[in-house]
Image (cartoon, rainbow, N blue to C red):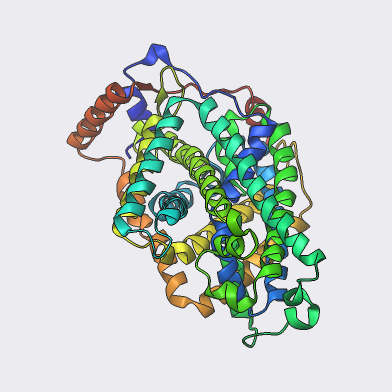
């Protein structure tokens, strides 16, 4: 992680053959990336956690609706940031641009080390569990079998993403439609139940019967559980440089996708409660399967397949976007510069994809990953808050900067108020979980000062890195990309006046 300019000079073995990331993400694919990343395993895992902490059906539904509303506020802020700082890398690129290298590196460190590999591992395990369940109807699928199938799935989708951006986006499009159809099936069956009069758990007098005394801390934890299901709403910002006309399509995709997902999630939870009592839902380890067994009869096999399709598309979306985060971090000099190279012909960031794949497989081999969901949710919310605080700071620091979209100041302020309350009470309710999340983030401080800030490393270090980079270029057939300035020139010129 030595000086970026030195590495460019020393390791660019294919200087004359530079290529750029292709702009192949239109409005439809942009919507598919947002929806496909949000709708993964979360809607099939989180309802139990939300209900457990909320303590009642009515309050849990309010949490789901408000969770979507908070995502909408955050996505509006990201829409402004995405067209003001049109770089791939999302939160990391914005925080680095606004607050500097250390803060940006800490966000990158926590994301690469824990957030995205863990989330990918959870989704992959959910996929393998649901695929294997029909073969093991009387018991849980074997530990080795679930890990093996999850690993094969991750390896296959990594190969697809390495081969072609177009293939990856087409898979995302198809499986996004498939997962929406699966949730629509749940919603339709649930609505039929309601029209038949099966909605006892949804009656106001019953819905707000609390199994435990509600507290702000427990409600905060319910929001953290819901946030896992909503995570991914900001992922389109990670691939800004590959979007066709990002200043138009980035905000449009956000405006379409977030309300749609919120509606689908709320109706899905209503459908669950049309067929299950709160006690049955809390006792279920696979909510969608229990729902199918109760209402679909001989067609109950549809639900495991639907969940498998949903999670397969989620894995693809997370691989696609998280690899771009590694790519952006390497381009800024915060990760080995090999990760900032793309394939000479396919124009895909193969080294970054391989790192994401390897990190996910390591997490899969370590053991149970579900206990890390709270860590992931906490770190996610931490990064969202820092990024949106950066929006306010940028408004003050560079008021004349070109902003194709300029939202009301009330939106980021409202988000940050909610963010502060949520994290404060989460720390109070789960100090160990949140404290470990902070420790994970802060372990990046010494790594930053040794790997990035320290410029005068021994010469042998640079020679080793140069050799490894050269070998990596040969093996992966990758080169340094050219920067496409067509979208950034107007903003760059404006910076000089600020």
In the shown orientation, is residue 106 left or right of residue 276? left
Q: Quadrant of the N terminus?
A: top left
Q: Looking at the image, which residue sits at the far bottom?
A: 213
**Looking at the image, which residue is at 53% across and 75% down?**
283
From this view, report whether residue 263 is shown above or below residue 64: above
From this view, report whether residue 257 is shown above or below residue 347: below
Judge by depth and name the residue closer to the eye, 295 or 89.
295
In the shown orientation, is residue 182 left or right of residue 364? right
Judge by depth and name the residue closer to the eye, 165 or 461.
165
Judge by depth and name the residue closer to the eye, 295 or 412.
295
**Looking at the image, which residue is at 76% across and 72% down?**
199
In the shown orientation, is residue 140 left or right of residue 229? left
Q: Quadrant of the C terminus?
A: top right
- Residue 423: x and y in percent read 57, 70
From this view, report whether residue 44 is shown above or below residue 492: below
Using the rendered view, name the quadrant where residue 493 is placed: top right
Q: Looking at the image, which residue sits at the far front?
A: 298
- Residue 252: x and y in percent read 74, 38
């Amino acid at each position: 992680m030595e000086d970026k300019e030195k590495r460019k000079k020393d390791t660019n073995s294919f200087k004359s053959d530079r290529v750029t990331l292709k702009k192949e993400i239109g409005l439809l694919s942009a919507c598919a990336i947002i929806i496909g990343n949000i709708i993964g395993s979360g809607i099939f895992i989180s309802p139990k956690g939300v209900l457990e902490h909320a303590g009642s059906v009515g309050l849990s539904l309010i949490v789901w609706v408000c969770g979507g509303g908070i995502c909408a506020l955050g996505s509006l802020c990201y829409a402004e940031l995405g067209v003001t700082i049109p770089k791939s890398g999302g939160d990391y690129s914005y925080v680095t641009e606004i607050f500097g290298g250390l803060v940006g590196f800490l966000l990158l460190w926590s994301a690469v080390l824990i957030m995205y590999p863990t989330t990918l591992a959870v989704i992959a395990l959910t996929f393998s569990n649901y695929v294997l369940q029909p073969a093991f109807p009387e018991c849980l699928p074997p530990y080795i079998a679930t890990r093996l199938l999850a690993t094969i799935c991750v390896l296959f989708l990594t190969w697809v993403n390495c081969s072609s951006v177009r293939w990856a986006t087409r898979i995302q499009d198809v499986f996004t439609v498939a997962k929406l159809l699966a949730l629509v099936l749940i919603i339709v069956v649930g609505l039929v139940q309601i029209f038949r009069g099966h909605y006892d758990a949804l009656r106001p007098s019953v819905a707000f019967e609390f199994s435990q005394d509600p507290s702000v801390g427990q409600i905060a934890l319910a929001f953290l559980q819901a946030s896992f299901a909503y995570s991914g709403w900001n992922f389109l910002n990670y691939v800004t440089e590959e979007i066709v006309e990002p200043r138009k399509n980035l905000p449009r995709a956000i405006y379409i996708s977030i309300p749609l997902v919120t509606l689908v999630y709320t109706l899905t939870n209503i459908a669950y409660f049309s067929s299950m009592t709160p006690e049955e839902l809390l006792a279920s380890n696979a909510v969608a399967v229990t729902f199918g067994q109760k209402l679909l009869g001989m067609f109950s096999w549809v639900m495991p397949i639907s969940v498998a399709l949903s999670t397969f598309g989620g894995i693809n979306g997370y691989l696609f976007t998280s690899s771009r985060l590694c790519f952006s971090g390497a381009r800024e000099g915060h990760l080995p510069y090999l990760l900032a190279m793309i394939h000479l012909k396919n124009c895909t960031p193969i080294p970054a994809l391989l790192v994401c794949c390897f990190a996910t497989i390591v997490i899969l081999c370590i053991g149970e990953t579900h206990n890390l969901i709270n860590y992931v949710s906490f770190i996610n919310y931490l990064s969202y808050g820092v990024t949106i605080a950066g929006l306010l700071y940028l408004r003050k620091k560079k008021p004349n900067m070109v902003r194709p979209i300029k939202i009301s100041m009330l939106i980021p302020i409202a988000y940050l108020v909610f963010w502060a309350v949520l994290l404060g009470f989460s720390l109070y309710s789960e100090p160990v979980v949140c404290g470990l999340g902070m420790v994970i983030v802060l372990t990046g401080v010494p790594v930053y000062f040794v790997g990035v800030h320290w410029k005068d490393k021994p010469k042998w270090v640079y020679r080793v890195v140069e050799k490894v980079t050269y070998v990596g270029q040969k093996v992966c057939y990758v080169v340094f990309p050219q920067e496409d300035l067509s979208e950034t020139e107007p903003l760059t010129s404006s910076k000089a006046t600020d």
